[in-house]
Structure formats: structure tokens, C-alpha cells
Amino acid sequence: MTMQLFSAVIAAPFGRMGIRVENDTLRELVYLPAEVELRPPRDALSREIAAQMRAYFKDPDFTFTLPLPEVGTAHQRKVWQQICMIPRGDVLTYGQLARRIRSAPRAVGQACGSNWYPLIIPCHRVTAADGIGGFARHDGGFHQGVKRWLLSHEQVPGYC
């Protein structure tokens, strides 16, 4: 992914966050490693998104108020809606969330990996039954470190 796609790249406690805005609409948030060059926000919406993300990094109880366009399949939107209902400090397993919506754990995991708006739709709050599970379609490395930081930041027992 070329860095030119991002309207801003901001510092995050775990590395960087890429913000992509098109036509005055948030299109995507991306976890990036610390080596990626920072890019100041180039428009008003990118500045607002960056400000809200920084507020969350300081306070895990911060509530995002950004308008999100409807994206994804009906199943993905159902999963994302349920994820948004998981309170800070709690997690659900893929299986628990799947039972709530009468789906399968693997389908829930795929929807989590397809999340265009991480942090805002807190898919890090969904874990495997026997551990942290994957994150952002990765099973380890940088992305799993991001998930661990987010769960610790939100004071989830076992991850603090």
C-alpha cells in the first residue's frame, strides 16, 4: 500500500495509524509500523479523525463520534454492530459472538479482519477461546502486538 493513499499518518503508541479520506468521507484506518513516515493531516476531516484517535490513545473511555459510511456485507455489518456493543475492558470470543448472531466463529473472524475502521469498530475486543487470536488478518508479529497494546490500554484482565 503506497503511503500516498493516506490523508494523514499519525503517531500511535504501537507504531502509526494511516487515515484515508476520499471525497470528505473516511474510507479506511490502517495499523502501520513505526518506520512509516508521519504525514500531517491534509484536510479538516483528517484533522478531526487524528484528534479523536489521539484522544482515544490518552483515554480508553473516549467515545468516537465520526460518521462512518456503510460498507461491507450484511453479515459483516451485523458482526461490526455486535463488536461495537462490547464494553471497554471486556472481550468476547469469536464463538461467543457467533452464537449471538447465529453464525460461525470463522465467519466472525473473517468479518473482524475485514473491518475498515479499527479502533472505532473495536475488533480487538474479539479473541480466540484459547488466547488472543489473530488480528487484522495476521496471526502474529506487529499486528498481534497492536492487539495486545489495545487490550492492555483498555485494561482487559489478562492483558494488562
Image (spheres, grey):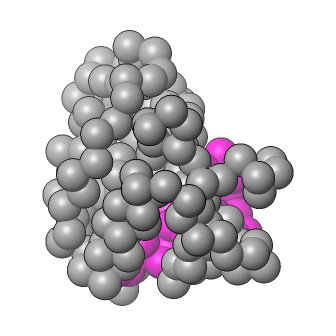
- Give the side of residue 30 with respect to residue 101, left or right: right
Report the label total.
Answer: 0
Nearer to us in this view, 20 or 103: 20
Q: Quadrant of the C terminus?
A: bottom left
* Residue 32 visible in the snapshot: yes
Image x and y of residue 91, in percent: 29, 58
* Residue 129 visible in the snapshot: no
Picture quadrant where residue 142 is located: bottom right
Q: Residue at x 37, y 23 (%)?
A: 70
Nearer to us in this view, 53 or 121: 53
Q: Is residue 132 magenta?
A: yes
Q: Is residue 143 above or below residue 158?
A: above
- Give the side of residue 2 with respect to residue 145, left or right: right
In this view, the residue farthest toward the front is: 43
Picture quadrant where residue 110 is located: top right
Nearer to us in this view, 94 or 54: 54
The stretch of residues the image draws in magenta is: 130-154
- Give the side of residue 87 with respect to residue 107, left or right: left
Image x and y of residue 120, in percent: 34, 52
Picture quadrant where residue 52 is located: bottom left
Image x and y of residue 85, in percent: 18, 45
Q: Residue at x 71, y 47 (%)?
A: 5
Q: Is residue 84 above or below residue 147?
A: above
Q: Residue at x 29, y 75 (%)?
A: 55
In this view, the residue farthest toward the top is: 74
Q: Is residue 61 above or below residue 78?
A: below
Image x and y of residue 54, in percent: 38, 76
